[in-house]
């Protein structure tokens, strides 16, 4: 019985094709980043590298002993242990956040074990100072930028936890924290729903390893797999809102009293029965990154009614323009879209919007 099912898996990507970033040793960097790294090495020119870094939408690169790395996990375990052994215990818990902030910084940092040991305490002392007196204006040197980034992350994670219960929010990149906070700020009714329903978000959850995300009904936890917290902001918010779609729209639609027939669920399911034909040919699929291409997203929704619920909730919330454009294409006079497909989309949108109006205010 579907209501007793407590795990909804989310095969967001094929694990064979797309290992989580942490499992990849680092050679597969975007060409622009590789070029910037090479240029920086040869020119050794801060201005040039800064200029190039400006063209990279998301940096996520660091030169570790001359080798490009994209996550803290890309650093050899031996090096991580050596740093922790060589610095004062007070700073031990900051090794990972500092390295991650360096990876996220708009300039490419060239770091060695020795430099990390020397720099981390200085950066953290600066962070402690900034916690008491945030500098105005913000100094623009590498050490200050890293400390300010850590300060902002602390503030954004704190802000997020004041609205929704989370685990490991401090591992989420600053742009992603900022974007999710902005979304929650503009939708207080959604925050209210999450609080009342007791929904918790678990970032870097091993339960979601290799499947992107997962919502477990029994304990009402949204899980995001390690690596998603550092995705580009648009992708991060969509993957998160898909899982929150299971926890909200789908949960409301499918949580019925045993004696009451939920007509909304029936109508939405009837629409899905039509739209799932031919691998969901007329469904909307967005590009959610490697291993999560539009065709895969359509097939995914076609194969499971609950994925159809979660994905379209995410579309309505994070990409209303693209959903509307899709509906206009479906309904364009004179095209060859079957009438029952047009009708099914019309019925599905009525239900979806009814719940979205309740949840997002
Ligand atoms: Zn799902």
Image: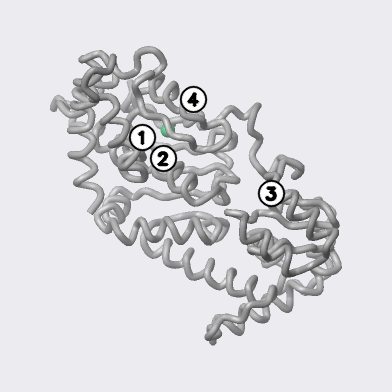
- Mark 2 touches mark 3? (CB < 8 Å): no
Where is mark 2, residue-wise?
243
Q: Quadrant of residue 320?
A: top left
Q: Is residue 30 left or right of residue 178?
A: right
In this picture, is 166 found above or below 118?
A: above
Q: Residues within 10 Å of mark 4 (few under 14, many from 20)?
A: many
Q: Residues within 10 Å of mark 2 (few under 14, many from 20)?
A: many
In the picture, the quarter occupied by the C terminus is bottom left
- Whichever of callouts 2 and 4 sits on the residue coming sooner in the sequence is 2
Q: What kind of element bears circle 1? A: helix
Q: What kind of element bears circle 3? A: helix
Q: Nearer the viewer, mark 1 or mark 3?
A: 3
Residue 212: where, in percent of width, then height? 53, 37
Q: Is mark 1 within 8 Å of ligand 1?
A: yes
Where is mark 4, residue-wise?
296
- Mark 1 touches mark 2? (CB < 8 Å): yes
Q: Residue at x 58, y 41 (%)?
A: 206
- Whichever of callouts 1 and 3 sits on the residue coming sooner in the sequence is 3
Q: Is mark 2 within 8 Å of ligand 1?
A: yes
In the picture, the quarter occupied by the N terminus is top left
The numbered dot on residue 32 is 3
Q: What's the distance in space between the residues labelled 3 and 4, CA to CA?
A: 27 Å
Where is mark 1, residue-wise?
310
- Whichever of callouts 3 and 4 sits on the residue coming sooner in the sequence is 3
- Mark 1 touches mark 4? (CB < 8 Å): no
Q: What's the distance in space between the residues labelled 1 and 2, CA to CA?
A: 7 Å
């Amino acid at each position: 019985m579907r209501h007793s099912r407590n795990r909804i898996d989310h095969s967001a990507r094929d694990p064979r094709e797309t290992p989580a970033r942490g499992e990849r040793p680092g050679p597969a960097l975007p060409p622009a980043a590789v070029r910037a790294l090479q240029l920086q090495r040869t020119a050794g020119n801060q201005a040039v590298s800064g200029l190039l870094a400006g063209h990279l939408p998301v940096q996520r690169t660091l030169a570790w002993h001359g080798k490009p790395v994209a996550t803290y996990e890309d650093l050899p375990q031996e090096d991580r242990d050596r740093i922790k052994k060589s610095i004062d215990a007070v700073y031990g818990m900051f090794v990972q956040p500092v390295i991650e902030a360096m990876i996220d910084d708009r300039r490419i940092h060239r770091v060695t074990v020795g430099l990390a040991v020397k720099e981390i305490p200085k950066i953290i002392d600066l962070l402690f100072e900034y916690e008491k007196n945030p500098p105005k204006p913000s100094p623009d040197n590498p050490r200050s930028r890293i400390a300010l980034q850590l300060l902002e992350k602390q503030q954004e994670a704190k802000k997020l936890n004041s609205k929704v219960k989370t685990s490991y929010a401090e591992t989420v990149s600053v742009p992603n924290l900022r974007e999710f906070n902005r979304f929650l700020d503009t939708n207080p009714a959604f925050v209210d729903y999450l609080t009342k329903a007791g929904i918790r978000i678990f970032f870097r959850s091993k339960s979601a390893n290799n499947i992107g995300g997962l919502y477990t009904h029994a304990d009402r936890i949204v899980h995001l797999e390690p690596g998603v917290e550092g995705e580009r902001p648009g992708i991060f918010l969509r993957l998160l809102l898909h899982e929150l779609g299971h926890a909200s729209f789908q949960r409301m639609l499918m949580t019925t009293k045993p004696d009451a027939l939920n007509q909304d669920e029936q109508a939405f399911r009837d629409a899905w029965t039509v739209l799932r034909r031919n691998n969901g040919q007329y469904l909307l699929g967005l590009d959610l990154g490697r291993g999560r291409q539009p065709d895969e997203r359509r097939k995914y929704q076609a194969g499971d009614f609950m994925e159809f619920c979660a994905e379209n909730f995410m579309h309505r919330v994070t990409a209303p323009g693209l959903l509307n454009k899709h509906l206009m294409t479906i309904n364009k006079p004179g095209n060859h879209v079957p009438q029952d497909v047009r009708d099914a989309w019309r019925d599905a949108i009525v239900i979806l919007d009814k719940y979205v109006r309740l949840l997002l205010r």
